[in-house]
């Protein structure tokens, strides 16, 4: 029995580009312990989002294994897959693209409560209000439409929606990248606080080493579909051994 919450091994995914197959993921291995934040960094096109999409079962890998809570994720079907989705949530860079912009905030948070049977219908308004408070938003926001609120508020709504099902892991794909610096710092603080309260683990995909410094327990560096280096943030940022990490450090502000 391993103590890992998530482990990924030999993950491989080929796409075709100009009629030729190429490996977007070429044998990716890493693990995340309960309550841990692993930052996944790397240049654009290195395969970070494809890793996220494979874990979330949005893309079927060609080879490899993904274990979550001791279960083989790629074997799950039907009810077992739905139940896993409640414990493995995601937040993307742009909630406007992910959500129906005309949906109300209440509706967006109601969906996971309903789909995963977290709260009965009569209890859902109170559950929505309490989730909004947990992410630092006023319950008055419930009746607003997604396109009417700010980018930072939208990302807080996305976080409220993700934590509604009490997950153990949230995959964040560039979730704070589009936010201004001060809004970003506040959202990172919120994510830290939720982690301290609930023992959540994060797979934190980012290209921003400032974000890595602020949140990561460990960092995995990707390049061309492979993990080229893993270690503590101080080691990756202070004494990078791979050319990829050195380039990221050199390019950082
Ligand atoms: P990152 O998130 O690190 O920027 P991605 O995982 O999005 O990288 O992409 C990795 C590589 O796979 C890129 O070359 C990208 O163009 C390619 N790719 C991603 N998704 C697809 C797809 N659905 N079809 C073809 N190529 C894809
Ligand atoms: Mg990406």
Image (spheres, rainbow, N blue to C red):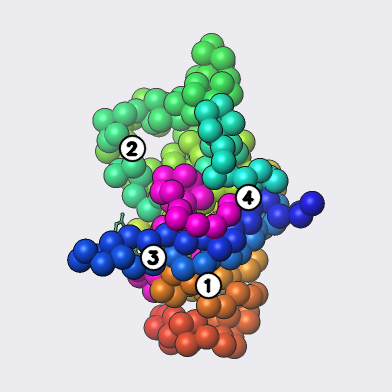
Q: Secondary structure at mark 1?
A: strand
Give the crowd class for mark 4: few <14, some 14-19, many >=20 residues within 10 Å. some
Q: Classify residue 206 as left or right of residue 120.
A: left
N-terminal of the pair, mark 2 or mark 1, is: 2
- Residue that numbered label 2 is attached to: 99
Instruction: Give the Cα distance between marks 4 and 3.
Output: 20 Å
Determine whether the residue tagged by mark 3 lies in a helix, strand or loop. Answer: strand
Q: How far apart are the two marked residues, 2 and 1, measured between alpha carbons? A: 31 Å
In which image quadrant can residue 43 be found?
bottom left
Query: Where residue 123 sits: x, y (%)?
Result: 56, 16
Which segment did they paint magenta? 38-66
Instruction: Please name which of the two marks, 2 or 3, marks the residue nearer to the observer.
Output: 3
Give the mark toward the camera: 3 or 1.
Answer: 3
Q: Which residue does the numbered mark 4 point to in the structure image?
A: 67
Pointer 3: residues within 10 angstroms few (<14), some, or many (20+)?
many
Say if residue 237 shows up in the picture. yes
Residue 234 position by quadrant: bottom right
Instruction: Residue 22 in the image: state x and y as whole percent.
Output: 34, 68
CB-based contact (under 8 Å), mark 4 and mark 1: no
Q: Which residue is mark 3?
A: 24
4 or 3: tag closer to the N-terminus: 3
Looking at marks 2 and 3 on the same chain, the residue that comes earlier in the sequence is marked by: 3
As measured in the structure, the alpha-carbon distance from the residue carrying label 2 to the one carrying label 3 is 27 Å
Query: Does residue 201 show up?
Result: no
Badge 3 or badge 1: first in the primary sequence? 3
The residue at the point 76 percent across, 54 percent down is: 3
Residue 227 is marked as 1
- Residue at 63% x, 56% y: name it: 7
Instruction: Name the residue rendered at 31%, 29% in the picture.
Output: 103
User: How far across and how far down the image is residue 165, in percent?
Assistant: 57, 33
Cα separation, mark 4 vs mark 1, equals 18 Å
């Amino acid at each position: 029995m391993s103590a890992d919450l998530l482990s990924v091994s030999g993950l491989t995914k080929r796409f075709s580009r100009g009629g030729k197959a190429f490996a977007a993921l070429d044998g990716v291995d890493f693990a995340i312990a309960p309550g841990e934040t692993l930052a996944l960094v790397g240049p654009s096109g290195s395969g970070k989002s494809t890793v996220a999409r494979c874990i979330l079962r949005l893309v079927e890998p060609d080879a490899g294994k993904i274990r979550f809570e001791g279960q083989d994720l790629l074997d799950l079907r039907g009810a077992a897959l739905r139940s896993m989705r409640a414990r493995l949530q995601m937040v993307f860079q742009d909630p406007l693209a992910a959500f129906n912009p005309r949906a109300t905030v209440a509706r967006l948070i109601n969906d996971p409560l309903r789909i995963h049977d977290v709260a009965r219908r009569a209890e859902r308004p109170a559950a929505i209000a309490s989730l909004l408070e947990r992410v630092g938003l006023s319950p008055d926001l419930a009746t607003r439409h997604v396109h009417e609120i700010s980018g930072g508020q939208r990302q807080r709504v996305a976080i409220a929606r993700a934590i509604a099902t009490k997950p153990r892991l949230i995959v964040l794909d560039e979730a704070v990248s589009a936010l201004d610096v001060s809004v970003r710092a506040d959202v990172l603080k919120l994510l830290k606080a939720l982690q301290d309260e609930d023992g959540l683990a994060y797979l934190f995909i980012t290209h921003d080493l400032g974000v890595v410094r602020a949140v990561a327990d460990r960092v995995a560096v990707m390049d061309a579909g492979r993990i080229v280096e893993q270690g503590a943030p101080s080691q990756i940022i202070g004494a990078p051994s791979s050319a990829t990490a050195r380039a990221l450090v050199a390019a950082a502000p």
